[in-house]
Image (cartoon, rainbow, N blue to C red):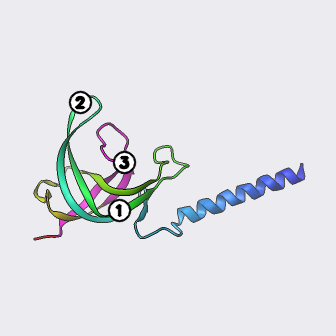
Amino acid sequence: MGALRLLQWAAAMAVAAVTAVGAQGAQLGERDFHYGDTVTLAGTLSVEERSTARNAADRVYLLALDAPMTVIGDPMNAFNTGTVHGVIEIQLTRSARISFRDLVDRRVRATGELFPRRSAHHHTPVLMMVSKIEALDS
């Protein structure tokens, strides 16, 4: 029984060490992010009409990224377990006080929190709740 407890303890310590390294973001690449991270991304803003599974029309603001990114899931979180590689487009969401209308078809820099698709109104695997957005061109 002592050897089994020692083995269980060693396994628990290994899991804790891996979890701690992941939480600190060790060895993340320049374009690797986690859900919940607040990031600043650049790209071209567009707007499209897209349909939901129930044929409702959504006006969707999309940011075509300048470079692909990876968003790393958390296997311990029920809402964002999956990692998404090669993300080149994200849907932007906003609070009522931020407007995207004058920025469509322009290069922009958007800052906000990344989160995964959760509903039929989310049209890309990764979305951003925008806290700030600005034009990069004049």
For the C terminus, the image quarter is bottom left
Query: Which segment is the magenta one?
Result: 112-136
Determine whether, in the image, residue 125 is placed left or right of residue 48. Answer: right
- Say which residue appears at 14% left-offset and 56% top-offset: 104
What's the residue at 54%, 49% (across, down)?
75
Give the amino acid type for the residue marked by disc 2 in the picture. Answer: Asn
Real-space Cα separation, disc 2 to disc 3, in angstroms? 19 Å
Residue 97 visible, this angle: no
**Position of residue 67 measured from the top left corner of the image (x, y, whole percent):** 32, 65
The answer to whether the residues at label 1 and label 2 have Cβ atoms under 8 Å apart is no
Q: Position of residue 79 (x, y in %)?
A: 46, 44
| Residue wearing tag 1 | 68
Q: Nearer the viewer, mark 1 or mark 2?
A: 1
Residue at which label 3 appears: 125
Q: Which type of secondary structure does the marked residue at label 2 adopt?
A: loop
The image's mark for residue 13 is: none
Residue behind mark 2: 55
Q: Residue 113, located in which quarter of the rendered image?
A: bottom left
Taking the spot 77% from the left edge, 56% from the top edge, the residue there is 9
Q: Quadrant of residue 34?
A: bottom left
Under mark 3, the amino acid is Pro
Does the magenta portion include 8?
no
Sequence-first tag of 1 and 2: 2
- Report the amino acid beneath label 1: Pro
- Left or right of residue 127, residue 61 in this image: left
Question: Closer to the N terminus: mark 2 or mark 3?
Answer: 2
Label 3: which secondary element: loop
In the rendered structure, which disc, 3 or 1, sits on the residue that comes first in sequence? Answer: 1
Binning the other alpha carbons within 10 Å of mark 3 as few (below 14), some (14 to 19) or many (20 upward) gives some
Extreme residue in the top direction: 54
Secondary structure mostly taken by the magenta-highlighted segment of the chain: strand
Q: Secondary structure at mark 1?
A: strand
